[in-house]
Amino acid sequence: MRTQMIHKAQNETDWPFAADSGILTCLKVLNEPAVYFVPETTPPATRAFALDTDLLGMSMINLGMTNVLKPYGSLEELLKRITPFIAMGRRLCAQPPGTNISGSEL
């Protein structure tokens, strides 16, 4: 498992998450990268929120989890917001163990 702390930039308008920061995580599930976001909230999140371009699958995995994503007007808008974080998370899985990188390197 690889993790990276991420934060919303001051003027970022496409930030998809309700929380301003959290941990982006990638782990291999059936030898495929799976990307998760754990929001930094009070009280702490009870589980990670799965991110995927398969919106139906993502909604089934995250069933019952509310207030993780900011409201969005359309599915296209949601995909536009989350796709960069999915790509960033998948790049985390490609990093060797023990690698410490800054968010801008992903």
Image (tube, helix red, strand yellow):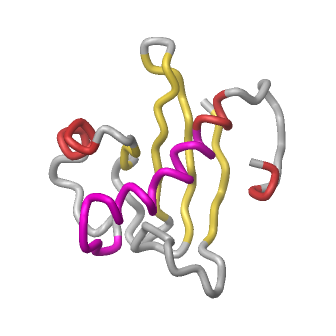
Percent coordinates x, y for residue 21 in the rendering: 56, 69
Tell which of 56 and 93 is nearer to you.
56
Q: Residue furthest bottom?
A: 11
Along the horizontal axis of the image, is 70 left or right of 36?
left
- Quarter where residue 11 is shown: bottom right
Task: State whether residue 19 is above or below residue 66.
Answer: below
73 magenta-colored: yes
Which residue: 43% across, 68% down? 17
Task: State whether residue 38 is above or below residue 16.
Answer: above
Which residue: 17% across, 47% down? 63
Which residue: 81% across, 50% down? 105
Q: What predominant SS class does the magenta segment belong to?
A: helix
Which residue: 82% across, 47% down? 101
Tell which of 104 and 100 is nearer to you.
104
Total numbered labels: 0
Percent coordinates x, y for residue 42 in the rendering: 42, 73
Task: State whether residue 57 is above or below residue 72.
Answer: above
Task: State whether residue 7 is above or below residue 55.
Answer: below
Percent coordinates x, y for residue 48 in the rendering: 40, 47
Along the horizontal axis of the image, is 43 left or right of 24?
left
Percent coordinates x, y for residue 73 in the rendering: 25, 73
In the picture, which quadrant includes the N terminus? top right
- The magenta stretch is 70-89
Tell which of 65 and 76 is nearer to you.
76
